[in-house]
């Protein structure tokens, strides 16, 4: 695609979506992030868009404080546009008066932000960022689990977490992972995350993995299980084709923005 055509498409996409990550544009157009930055600079000179940290927004988008642009409660935010779309799809899966569990991580934080827009919702979470997002909905019924706080990632886990969940039933659980690999399956970074997964899996019949496309072909420290660990995966449109094919062949439902909007 010629640069002139790409500039036109970027302008249209930003006008429609309000904000897009540079990495997402790079993937969509099959060019480097450096090339996308140059495109955005040209559009910014024309006052067609405005570049912010790692993303491009409409020129009318209000300026944010540096902390708001880069982090939430001190936790870095990356691939925001992808996670926002995942959050919207996740929220669309919630109905009725059952209890929802939201796990740790920033992808789950964006799920919480979308759930906060529902008229009423019942949420159990160990994710302090998610609890903060849900607090904006005064009608939301939010319970934060007990446990030891993992300061570096703002969630609680451990033995007290497991004890506090005895005899509960969760309608739907949303959990994020550190990596998804064809051979290693799902992986997480810490043993505390592994404990959360094992505990929640016993409390629900509807466990959903929320994972953006940058996590595929990536492994972290501890193996959680095969890619069939959950019956449903919510991701974005840039999921590698081989993974989508594998999921469908093994009975795992894949939800992504392109499918939802058809």
Image: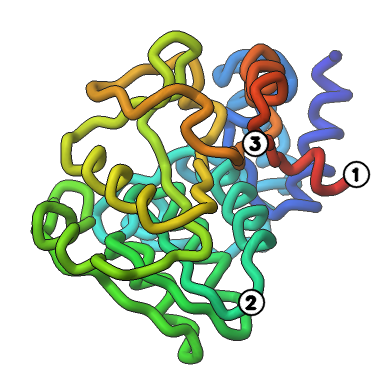
Badge 1, how many Cα within 10 Å: few under 14, some, many 20+? few
Residue 102 image position (x, y, % from top left): 41, 59
Q: Which mark is residue 235?
A: none
Q: Residue furthest top?
A: 183
Name the residue rendered at 71%, 25% in the picture: 248
Residue 158 image position (x, y, % from top left): 12, 52
**Observer able to see residue 26:** no
**Nearer to us in this view, 159 or 41:** 159
Position of residue 262 relative to residue 59, above or below, is above
Q: Which residue is mark 2?
A: 96
Task: Please indicate whether residue 142 sits to the left or right of residue 126 in the image.
Answer: right
Task: Please indicate whether residue 153 sits to the left or right of residue 43 in the image.
Answer: left
**Nearer to us in this view, 29 or 155:** 155
Q: Which residue is mark 1?
A: 262
Badge 3, how many Cα within 10 Å: few under 14, some, many 20+? many
**Observer able to see residue 202:** yes
Q: Which residue is mark 3?
A: 236
Which quarter of the image is occupied by the C terminus?
top right
Q: How many marks?
A: 3
Name the residue rendered at 17%, 60% in the picture: 161
- Looking at marks 3 and 1 on the same chain, the residue that comes earlier in the sequence is marked by 3
- Looking at marks 3 and 2 on the same chain, the residue that comes earlier in the sequence is marked by 2
- For the residues marked 3 and 1, what is the alpha-carbon distance in whole angstroms? 14 Å
For residue 180, which quarter of the picture? top left
- Looking at marks 2 and 1 on the same chain, the residue that comes earlier in the sequence is marked by 2
């Amino acid at each position: 695609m010629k640069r002139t055509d790409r500039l036109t498409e970027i302008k249209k996409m930003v006008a429609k979506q309000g904000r897009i990550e540079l990495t997402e544009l790079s993937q969509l157009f099959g060019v480097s992030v450096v090339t996308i930055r140059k495109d955005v600079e040209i559009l910014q000179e024309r006052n067609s868009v405005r570049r912010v940290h790692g993303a491009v927004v409409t020129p009318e988008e209000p300026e944010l404080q540096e902390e708001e642009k880069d982090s939430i409660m001190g936790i870095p935010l990356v691939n925001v546009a992808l996670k926002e779309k995942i959050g919207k799809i996740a929220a669309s899966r919630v109905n009725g008066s059952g209890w929802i569990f939201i796990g740790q991580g920033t992808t789950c934080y964006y799920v919480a932000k979308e759930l906060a827009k529902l008229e009423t919702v019942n949420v159990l979470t160990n994710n302090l960022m998610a609890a903060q997002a849900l607090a904006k909905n005064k009608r939301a019924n939010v319970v934060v689990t007990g446990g030891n706080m993992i300061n570096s990632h703002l969630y609680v886990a451990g033995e007290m977490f497991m004890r506090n969940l005895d005899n509960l039933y969760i309608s739907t659980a949303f959990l994020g992972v550190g990596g998804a690999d064809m051979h290693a399956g799902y992986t997480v970074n810490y043993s505390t995350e592994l404990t959360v997964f094992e505990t929640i899996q016993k409390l629900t019949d509807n466990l959903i993995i929320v994972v953006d496309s940058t996590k595929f072909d990536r492994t972290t420290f501890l193996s959680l299980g095969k890619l069939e660990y959950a019956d449903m995966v919510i991701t974005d449109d840039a999921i590698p084709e081989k993974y989508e094919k594998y999921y469908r062949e093994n009975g795992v439902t894949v939800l992504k923005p392109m499918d939802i909007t058809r």
